[in-house]
């Protein structure tokens, strides 16, 4: 009996689920390939041929989005009262951050497999297993104590590994700085999280909420630095664009941060 049929009978899916499942599975590679090819057709193959290494043909529109994002940021993060970092106990912040990292690991593993980075995928698989079990559902990062350090990636990096060019710089409403390649990667990442297909509703949304709160917390924790860029710079748009592109290109240039992972060299002393 095929997997879709078993799923339908076990979980009560309606008839026709097998056909919908097959269509979904068959369409995913087409969607991914379409996105990748679309970006590959960008007018500029890479930042090295753009003036100053910055390709920003949509600057006028990007600046309007930047102004909108600044207004949103000012509304939610620039009040006179204490923020998230000051009101939420550090222990709670750490638990939220650890849980958000744990639930993101399956998607990270998927991307690292597509990137051909099998050792890093193995490391993150072990991180997820340890934190989801011994770490009480991901609330505690015990894997970090065993030498399995946090290691993030996304489909934007996967596209970079596949040779897809960066494309033009973009500022996305609410999400902030990006590029054409990374924006496409963010869209694809909406469909590449394995937990979304195995965790029932509404439990699956717990991870999404935790990730959002964690990002909210990061903004609060680094409020002084972010405020200096957004509100103290002569041209916050140009400053933020430069910082993002430099940081993103640095991240993508790091083939294996911290060196290759050896699954037989995990430090278990004390556990």
Image: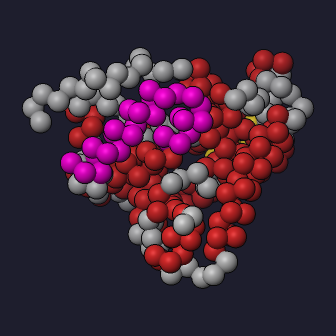
Q: Name the one closer to the observer, 185 or 173.
A: 185
Q: Residue at x 72, y 63 (%)?
A: 23
- Going 53% across and 53% down the picture, which residue do you hit? 193
Q: What quarter of the picture does the C terminus occupy?
A: top left
Residue 260 is left or right of residue 91, and the answer is right
Q: Report x, y in % for residue 247.
A: 57, 27
Q: Is residue 43 left or right of residue 67?
A: right
Residue 216 in sight here: no
State yes or no: residue 111 in magenta: yes
Q: Residue furthest right?
A: 43
Residue drawn at (33%, 39%), measured in percent from left and top? Answer: 127
Which residue is at the front of the view, 28 or 248? 28
Quarter of the image with the N terminus is bottom right
Q: Position of residue 102 (x, y in %)?
A: 37, 48
Q: Position of residue 161 (x, y in %)?
A: 65, 27
- Per the rendered image, the range of residues in magenta is 108-134
Image coordinates for residue 250, horizontal then vertical, percent: 58, 22
Left/right of residue 126 with respect to residue 213 in the rendered view: left
Callout count: 0
């Amino acid at each position: 009996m095929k997997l879709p049929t078993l799923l339908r009978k076990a979980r009560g899916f309606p008839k026709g689920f097998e056909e919908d499942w097959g269509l979904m599975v068959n369409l995913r590679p087409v969607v991914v390939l379409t996105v990748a090819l679309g970006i590959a057709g960008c007018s500029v193959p890479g930042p090295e041929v753009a003036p100053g290494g910055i390709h920003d043909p949509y600057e006028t529109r990007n600046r309007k989005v930047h102004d909108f994002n600044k207004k949103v940021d000012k509304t939610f993060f620039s009040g006179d009262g204490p923020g998230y970092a000051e009101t939420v106990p550090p222990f709670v912040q750490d638990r939220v951050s650890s849980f958000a990292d744990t639930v993101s690991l399956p998607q990270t593993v998927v991307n690292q497999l597509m990137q051909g980075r099998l050792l890093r995928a193995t490391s993150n698989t072990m991180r997820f297993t340890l934190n989801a079990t011994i770490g009480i559902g991901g609330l505690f990062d015990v894997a970090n104590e065993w030498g399995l350090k946090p290691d993030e990636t996304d489909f934007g990096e996967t596209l970079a590994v596949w040779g897809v060019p960066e494309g033009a710089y973009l500022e996305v409403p609410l999400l902030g700085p990006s590029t054409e390649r990374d924006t496409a990667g963010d869209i694809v990442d909406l469909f590449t999280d394995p937990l979304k297909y195995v965790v029932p509703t509404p439990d699956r949304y717990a991870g999404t909420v935790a990730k959002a709160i964690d990002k909210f917390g990061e903004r609060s924790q680094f409020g002084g630095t972010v405020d200096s860029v957004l509100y103290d710079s002569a041209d916050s748009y140009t400053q933020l664009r430069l910082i993002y592109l430099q940081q993103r290109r640095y991240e993508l240039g790091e083939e294996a941060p911290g060196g290759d992972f050896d699954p037989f060299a995990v430090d278990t002393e004390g556990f």
